[in-house]
Amino acid sequence: MAELLTIYGIHAAQAFFENAASRVVNVWFDRQRVDNKLVQLKAALGELGLPYQDEDKKTLDKLAKGGNHQGVVITARLPQELAEDALKKALKQTKGNAFYLVLDQVTDPHNLGACLRTALAAGVQGVIVPKDNACRINATVCKVASGAAELLPVYRVTNLSRTLKWLKTVGVWLSGAAGEAEKSIFSAELSGSVAIVMGAEGKGLRKLTQQQCDQLIKIPMTANTESLNVSVAAGIILYEVVRQNGIVSI
C-alpha cells in the first residue's frame, strides 16, 4: 500500500483543503465536538464534494498518534514529484527572474523538509533533486515542511549534471555552496536568474556538480565553527539572493 500522509488540527486541515483537496483520502471528525470552526470545515468539504466520518475522540487520538488534532484528522496521498519536462515548461513560462534551489544527493528527510519550508518562504520557484541517492517526498518530509511540500514544486531529474548544464543555456546563473570556495556569499553576484546548488549532509557538492557551477560560494564563519546543516546553510544563502534581488520585502 502506498504511504499516506496524516494531517490533523483545524488550521492544517483548512490549508490542506484549500491547496491540496484532490489528494484527500479520508477525513474524520470528533462527533462530540460542535465548534464553529469544525462546522465550517464540514461545510467546506460539502462544497468540495468530499465525504467525512464522525468518530469518537479515542479513534481520532489513535489516528493522530496522540497529536493535538482539535477534532479533525485527514489522510491524504503524498505530493507528486515532477519530472524534467515540467521543469522546462515552468522555466519557459517564467516571467522575470528564475529562482531555484538544487539539492545534490540530500538523503535526510528532515533536511529536505526544512529546505522546502525555507525555500518557499524565500520565494524559490522550485527545488531540483536527482533521481538517485536522494530523499523522496514522504510523510516525514511533509511534516517538517509544514505545508511547503504542497505548494512548492519538486523536480526529480535523471541526470543532475545534464540538467545543470541546460539551466545555464537558458540563462540561469549557478552558484554552488562549497566550504573551500574563496568567494563569500556577500561579495558574490547573486542577482538575476539564479539557482543555488547545495550538497549532501557532510559530503558537500560532488566534483561533477561543482564543475557545472558558474561560481562557488561560501558562508563566512569563525574558525572554530563546523560546517552548517544543509537546511540552515540553504536558508542563509537563499535570503542573500532575496536581499540582492529584492524578491520579498525584508
Image (cartoon, helix red, strand yellow):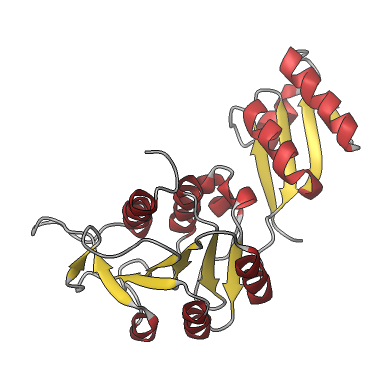
Determine whether 80 is above or below 114 in the image: below
Residue 93 visible in rendering? yes
* Rendered location of residue 68, percent (x, y): 59, 27
Give the tally of numbered discs: 0
Residue at (21, 62) in percent of width and height: 187
- Report whether 16 appears left or right of 51: left
* Rendered location of residue 138, percent (x, y): 60, 57
Determine whether 117 is above or below 182 in the image: above
Q: Give the position of the C terminus as an image quadrant.
A: top left
* Rendered location of residue 26, percent (x, y): 81, 41
Q: Give the position of the N terminus as an image quadrant.
A: bottom right
- Report whether 83 appears left or right of 145: right
Residue at the far left in the pictured view:
223
Residue at (79, 36) in percent of width and height: 27
Residue at (39, 53) in percent of width and height: 245
* Rendered location of residue 220, percent (x, y): 17, 59
Residue 30 visible in rendering? no
Residue at (78, 43) in percent of width and height: 21
- Report whether 52 appears left or right of 134: right
Determine whether 244 is above or below 36 in the image: below
Residue at the far front in the pictured view:
96
Determine whether 159 is above or below 2 in the image: below
- Report whether 210 appears left or right of 48: left
Instruction: Place residue 65 in its image quadrant.
Output: top right
